[in-house]
Image (cartoon, grey):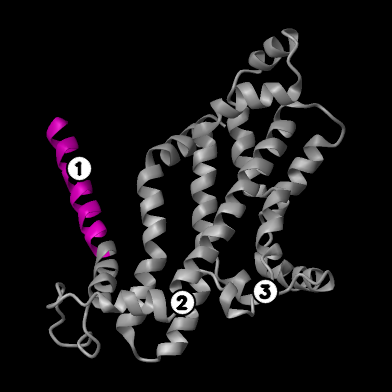
């Protein structure tokens, strides 16, 4: 029995290892190409380690193609999206989890129903709404919606709040704390794992968001990184080394955030999914 279990475990690790290597190949190729001299990226056989390293590709993309401005724009939009989403979802989920009022279940089900609608269905009417208020070519369509809550974030935090004992709320209420103070002093600190998971999801979604900036932004100075990468591809034509350098700049922040927040991300998902 033990030998069979050990063999199965080893086989699983081997398969996962092979899968991990296969997943790394495109990233390594992208990184290698970004450091290759122009015209040498299509040599055969391909070189995983370029000789010499050409850092000028990053300099050209960062300064000449204005990726510095694109990065600052992405940071601003992502931070605002993070603040709005985490704050609004935490408050709404708290209200739905702990307050009894008429129509609460109907509101919760209607909110979950919006998760079943593809974003393409609401894209056109949403565009005309923003156009009617003169918000095109601004960051308002990318930011304001996050301060109104999101169905996924509310559901995630709602499920986590439901795993916490209701007695904490009752005890704090008896001691004279109002609902806002109970939320801020007790439940918000306890929800750090779920908030961290939501923050990682939100960061990745906001940072990689391409479609909405493409729809709403026209001024090149306002482009975010994904939109700037599309612009770069059209601007430099066949300069694959510059395109790959831009892709590395775009993807590295996501990798760094995910690696550093992985512990909290897994903890938040596990505690929400298993006990909800």
Residues shaded magenta: 1-22
Q: Please report whichever mark, 2 or 3, sits nearer to the chain's N-terminal start.
A: 2
Residue 252 is one of the magenta-drawn residues:
no
Residue 2 is one of the magenta-drawn residues:
yes
Q: Residue at x 87, y 32 (%)?
A: 102
Q: Which residue is mark 3?
A: 216
Q: Mark 2 to mark 3: distance in Å?
A: 20 Å
Q: Which residue is mark 2?
A: 66
Label 1 neighbour load within 10 Å: few <14, some 14-19, many 20+: few
Question: Most extreme residue toward the front, as rendered?
Answer: 63
Q: Nearer the viewer, mark 1 or mark 2?
A: 2
Q: Is the magenta region chiefly helix, strand or loop?
A: helix
Above or below — where is 124 with respect to 15? below
Q: Please report whichever mark, 1 or 2, sits nearer to the chain's N-terminal start.
A: 1
Q: Which residue is mark 1?
A: 8
Residue 186 percent across, percent down from the top left: 61, 21
Above or below — where is 172 with respect to 257? above
Q: Nearer the viewer, residue 128 or 144?
A: 144
Residue 72 percent across, percent down from the top left: 50, 64
Q: Are marks 1 and 2 in contact (CB under 8 Å)?
A: no
Label 3 neighbour load within 10 Å: few <14, some 14-19, many 20+: some
Residue 234 percent across, percent down from the top left: 46, 88
Q: Please report whichever mark, 3 or 1, sits nearer to the chain's N-terminal start.
A: 1
Q: Residue at x 48, y 80 (%)?
A: 230
């Amino acid at each position: 029995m033990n030998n069979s279990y050990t063999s199965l475990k080893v086989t699983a690790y081997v398969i996962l290892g092979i899968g991990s290597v296969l997943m790394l190949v495109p990233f390594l190729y992208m990184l290698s190409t970004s450091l290759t001299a122009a015209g040498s990226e299509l040599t055969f056989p391909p070189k995983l380690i370029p000789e010499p390293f050409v850092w000028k590709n990053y300099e050209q993309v960062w300064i000449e193609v204005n990726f510095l401005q694109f990065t600052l724009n992405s940071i601003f939009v992502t931070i605002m999206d993070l603040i709005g989403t985490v704050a609004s979802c935490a408050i709404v989920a708290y209200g739905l989890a702990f307050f009894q009022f008429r129509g609460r279940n109907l509101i919760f089900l209607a909110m979950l129903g919006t998760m079943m609608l593809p974003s393409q269905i609401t894209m056109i009417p949403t565009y005309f709404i923003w156009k009617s208020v003169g918000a095109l070519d601004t960051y308002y369509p990318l930011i304001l919606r996050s301060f109104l809550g999101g169905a996924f974030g509310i559901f995630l935090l709602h499920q986590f709040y439901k795993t916490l004992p209701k007695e904490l709320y009752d005890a704090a209420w008896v001691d004279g704390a109002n609902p806002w103070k109970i939320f801020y002093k007790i439940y918000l600190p306890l929800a750090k794992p779920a908030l961290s998971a939501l923050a990682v999801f939100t960061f990745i979604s906001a940072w990689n968001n391409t479609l909405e900036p493409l729809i709403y932004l026209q001024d090149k100075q306002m482009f975010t990184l994904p939109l700037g990468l599309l612009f770069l591809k059209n601007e430099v034509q066949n300069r694959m080394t510059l395109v790959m350098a831009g892709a590395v700049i775009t993807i590295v922040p996501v990798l760094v955030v995910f690696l550093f927040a992985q512990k909290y991300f897994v903890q938040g998902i596990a505690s929400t999914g298993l006990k909800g």
